[in-house]
Amino acid sequence: MKTKILLAEDDVDFGMILKQYLELEDFEVVWFQNPADIIPVLSADFTFHIGILDIMMPNIDGFSLAKMILKEKTDFPILFLTAKNQKIDRLTGLKIGADDYIAKPCDPEELILRIKNILKRVQPATPENIISIGSYQLDTEKLLLSHTAGNIRLTIREQQLLLHLLKHNKKAIKRDDILDSLWETNDYFTGRSLDVFISRLRKYLSNDPEIKIQSLRGIGFEVDFPTP
């Protein structure tokens, strides 16, 4: 899932350049030239991960807009854009609850770094043994596949196969390569065993329709696991 950015910037040229650059970095950007247009969004399905707000905007300045957003979404991270590198801007933004600010015109690479640093601070760290697979989470230490519909305790072989498929996500995987890697042998019986394990994984992961483990005739399998 892409990080979704709320961008409030009334300068058309700067806003367009900034939006295009952020999208090149694989962010999803919703750009509001008129900050007043953001107000109705607050009471709707607010799915943004971070806000980038210009301070100097007509009708509603960035500080006032931030107060409105934080009143509804108290933990929403905000980075201010300002053409004035003045102390009062820093203090006001910090008092409101801003996470960072950057002066315009800004270095795009510095902006990207600041965005990523903010997201690291506000998003809970994921333990190294936890892997997200679509709407599932796999705890590799506990061999536990978790979902809101229920949890499943995997066998060691099931987890090994799932991790192998995940390693080759969105690629064609040869049956022979799986058997040689996990079973270290390739005969009729291990081939049948592989088919059984594939069927189990399909069943375990069936609560997420976006997850696909497709058989490729004469080749093996192709998997599509949505990942963050």
Image (tube, grey):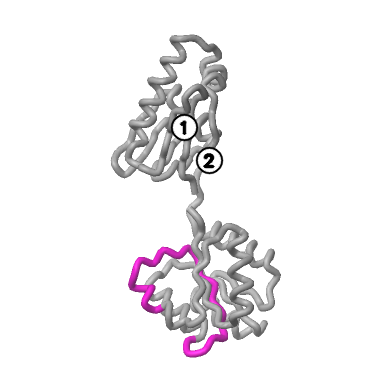
Q: Residue at x 42, y 44 (%)?
A: 134
Which circle's residue, 2 or 1, is located before the other in the chain?
A: 2
Answer above or below: position of 120 versus 67: above
Circle 2: residue type: Glu
Circle 1: residue type: Glu
Residue 184 percent coordinates (x, y): 55, 14
Q: Which residue is mark 1?
A: 141
Observer-nearest of 53 and 167? 167
| Mark 2 closeness class: few <14, some 14–19, many ≥20 residues within 10 Å | few
Observer-nearest of 85 and 207? 207
Residue 16 percent coordinates (x, y): 60, 74
Q: Residue at x 52, y 18 (%)?
A: 179
Residue 98 in sight from this viewpoint: no
Quadrant of res 116: bottom right
Q: Which residue is mark 2?
A: 128
Left or right for 95, reference 152: right
The stretch of residues the image draws in magenta is 39-60
- Does residue 153 belong to the magenta stretch? no
Quadrant of res 100: bottom right
Answer above or below: position of 118 versus 221: below
| Mark 1 closeness class: few <14, some 14–19, many ≥20 residues within 10 Å | few
Q: Pointer 2 and pointer 1: residues touching (CB < 8 Å)?
A: no
Residue 168 percent coordinates (x, y): 55, 34
Question: Residue farthest to the front?
Answer: 217
Q: Residue at x 60, y 85 (%)?
A: 88
Secondary structure of the residue carrying numbered label 1: loop
Quadrant of res 192: top left
